[in-house]
Image: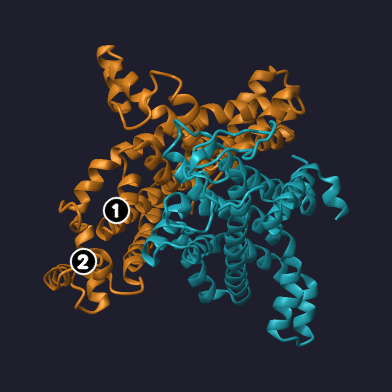
Chain colours: A orange, B cyan
Amino acid sequence: MFKYIIRRLLQLIPVIIGISIVVFMIVHLAPGDPILMMLGEDATPEDYLRLQRIYGFDRPIYEQYLRWAGNAIQGDLGVSIRQGAPVSMLIYSRLPATIELAFVSVLLAVLLGVPLGVLAAIKRQSPVDFFSMVIALLGVSMPGFWVALMLLTYVALNVGWIPMFGRGGSVFYGLWQLITTFDGSELYDGLRYVMLPAISIGTAMMAIITRLTRSSLLEIMGKDYIRTARAKGLTERVVVFKHGLRNALLPVVTVVGIQFGAMLGGAVITETVFAWPGAGRLIVNAIQQRDFPIVQGGVLMMALIFTLVNLTVDLSYAVLNPRIRYD
Amino acid sequence: MKKIIRNRSALVGLILISILLFFAIFANFVVPNDPYDMDIWVSYGAPEWFGEGSKYILGTDDMGRCVLSRIIMGSRISLMVGAVATGSSLILGVFFGAIGAYVGGKTDAIIMRLMDLILSIPSILLAIAIVATLGPGMVNAMIAIAIVRVPQMARVTRSMVLSIKEEDYVQAGKALGFSHGRILFKHILMNCFAPIMVVATLGMGTAIVVEAGLSFLGLGAQPPIISWGRMLAMGREAIRSAPHMTLYPGLAIVFTVLGFNLLGDGLRDIFDPQLKER
């Protein structure tokens, strides 16, 4: 197991190098002069020369890449053109909000999706099953940002205590505070704000989880060992939850991992709708202002998080399914 | 075709898509009003449904233009961007996937690592970044969507080709001295058609959602071209006074994507009966 983890970590290195090249190229493959693109039409020759020197655009392309990547490893992602602040600092200040939103969304999707999928599988061909399938189909067909707009229009505008925009307290810190001091005010404040964005982002994931849990559990329930378990006289509850669900959840874990990336991407647009102060909104604003160092750094960070989540998912297999051997 | 009609989900999907195609093709004839015609006296007008003398069934937008007519016109862009992007990613993906699986070895390794690389960046984010660099616009949006969709097509094709490659009839073709091209295209790819069509159909839905997202951020089709994503962006400014501006274009997207998802699911059940058992 330890060897496997080390090997997987080593395999990450070429992937990360690849990602960094792609992200670097995104700006450099652009047609036209990147400096003029950043500066816009009203650039003065002095600005032009200054930027050319700062970004080293007069050097050969591989030298530019090595310099950028070398700095990035040390945590230096350059300086924002519009805000003048270090990009790494800007991203660092926005990341907690994005991670919190993603975390709450996944939690919501799993907490609603798994039970609904289980119910649908147990009560097959029942109204519950039909309802769950409708939810599953609609959920994957609705763009997250439209769900966001609908929630704003029909929920936030009508329910006074649900705010429309921005972020309240930190949910993580609020939870900590509730545990340590029994003071739930920060948690309440955080949840109030995070609720609608999390539903918008989590809906599609919930739909996928519901559907997968249902089909996966149905498949497992047809296996021989389930029949054996029933024959032993175990209660249906133990059969379903201990023998069935535990095995059925393996593909669900994979999908949660894969969908996490889609969620990070989708969050970019949803964050914009709710004015959620996360990294996604930072990137979108940077695109609109042609602030390319932020775009580069932001996409790099998101891709890295995505890669690490996928690794974690792969590793969690070993814990969930001891039958899988890694050598 | 008979199987499609017997499969409920495929049938509903097909009907939804047919209705949509009808509206897209004959948009010029079925629109109740000129979608570009501004009637500023009734801007933000609420839906009038089918009341007596109602002119704007789904209301009007910020400039008093008929929302229903604009949704009908907008269907063209969604379908076109979706089809062109999915088609391009299909051609590229099938090409790379098939070559990789057929040739194997280093070629395969390089192609698949490249695909993994594209997959390692969240796709909407990558699409946004690509359009941001190339510049906003419909063609660039198509290019971006096509690029992020290639890996999935390549993976499906590759796995299919890998399994079919070992079939007896392919070996027979090789023994008869057929050219690689003939074996690959005539004997192998023809037999991968079904699963690839399933992925492409489901991919249409994804492509349309991504297009709407790009347009919503102002990175897709630019005015005066009408796109659903842009209509939502306009509606967002007026959710208090004119919620119909976001409700109906969004519903149009949902029904379109739903249609492709249902058809894709149905086709998968038809082509792979084992899956349906679940």
Q: Chain of mark 1?
A: A
Q: Chain of mark 2?
A: A
Nearer the observer, B75 or A271? B75
Q: Is residue A7 above or below residue B243?
A: below
Is there a contact, CB below 8 Å, between mark 2 and mark 1?
no
Q: Which quadrant of the rendered structure holds the C terminus of chain B?
A: top right
Residue A114: mark = none
- Answer with left or right where residue B26 lies relative to residue B169: left
Secondary element at image label 1:
helix
Nearer the observer, B121 or B246? B246
Q: Amino acid at mark 1?
A: Ala
Question: Can residue B203 be seen?
Answer: no
Q: Identify the residue position indicated by label 2 in the image.
A: A42
Question: Can residue A92 be seen?
Answer: yes
Q: Residue at x 70, y 32 (%)?
A: B52
- Answer with left or right where residue B14 lies relative to residue A40: right
- Answer with left or right where residue A300 lies relative to residue A117: left
Q: Position of residue B164 (x, y in %)?
A: 72, 67
Secondary element at image label 2:
loop
Q: Identify the residue position indicated by label 1 in the image.
A: A286
Q: Residue at x 51, y 33 (%)?
A: B243
Q: Which quadrant of the rendered structure holds the N terminus of chain B?
A: bottom right
